[in-house]
Image (tube, grey):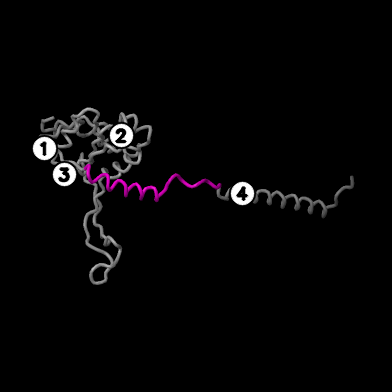
Amino acid sequence: MKALDGTSLRNSLLTGLMAGLGLLAAGAFAQSQPVGYPKANVDFGDFKQLVADVEVHRKARLIDLDTFLEMSREADTIILDARSKARFDRLHVGGAKHLNFSDFTQQSLSQVIPTLKTTVLIYCNNNFEGNEEDFPTKVALPVTRLPATGSPGPGGQRGGEQGPLMMALNIPTYINLYGYGYRNVYELNELVSVDDPRVRFSGLTASSTESGAE
């Protein structure tokens, strides 16, 4: 084999170096390209249709406290508390079962609710007043409401009255239960004092809240 002179050796080394750098650059470029994941399991169209269906269904299933308590004593009926476990552990309506809303799945719901025909009674923080520590009101302030049609308001101004926007957990809970196939759902529709003697509370702080009656 003929020995390479100095110039040929340098050229050979330079060619090899450039080839190596090219391979490194190609690898880095390949790693920076999108993997090409499929679309997430999220569909706003499905949600809008579900909300429209629930709006009609829910109207006939909003109940007062007396009805709520009476129904809670019937067979094949549960009270479902979907608040955080910390809130539930501190204070909840006596006899309620707990499943955090963020943990709702077909399987987890089936472990708490015996059948799709079971009567499910729901409530949330926004159903109780007089104890902001255990039942903090969920509300956004302030909110400028747009007219329902999105058209300009009086005087040609686009926008509307400022006021609170209630962020109650009951509504997303109801929507999800309906979506998972639970149609026998009823929602407490009153703002109840925590001192109401008709309500029996359980939990770590119940002794300072409970007024007595079942």
Q: Amino acid at mark 2?
A: Leu
- Which residue in the structure is indicated by mark 2? 99
Q: Residues within 10 Å of mark 2 (few under 14, many from 20)?
A: many
Q: Amino acid at mark 4?
A: Ala
| Viewer-closest of 98 and 179 | 179
- Which residue in the structure is indicated by mark 1? 196
Q: Quadrant of residue 100?
A: top left
- Which residue in the structure is indicated by mark 4? 30
Q: Position of residue 170 (x, y in %)?
A: 26, 43
Q: Are marks 4 and 2 in contact (CB under 8 Å)?
A: no
Helix or strand or loop: what does disc 1 sit on? loop
- 1 or 3: tag closer to the N-terminus: 3
- 2 or 3: tag closer to the N-terminus: 2
- Which residue in the structure is indicated by mark 3? 191
Q: Which residues are magenta?
A: 35-61
Q: Position of residue 1 (x, y in %)?
A: 89, 44
Q: Residue at x 27, y 35 (%)?
A: 86
Helix or strand or loop: what does disc 4 sit on? helix
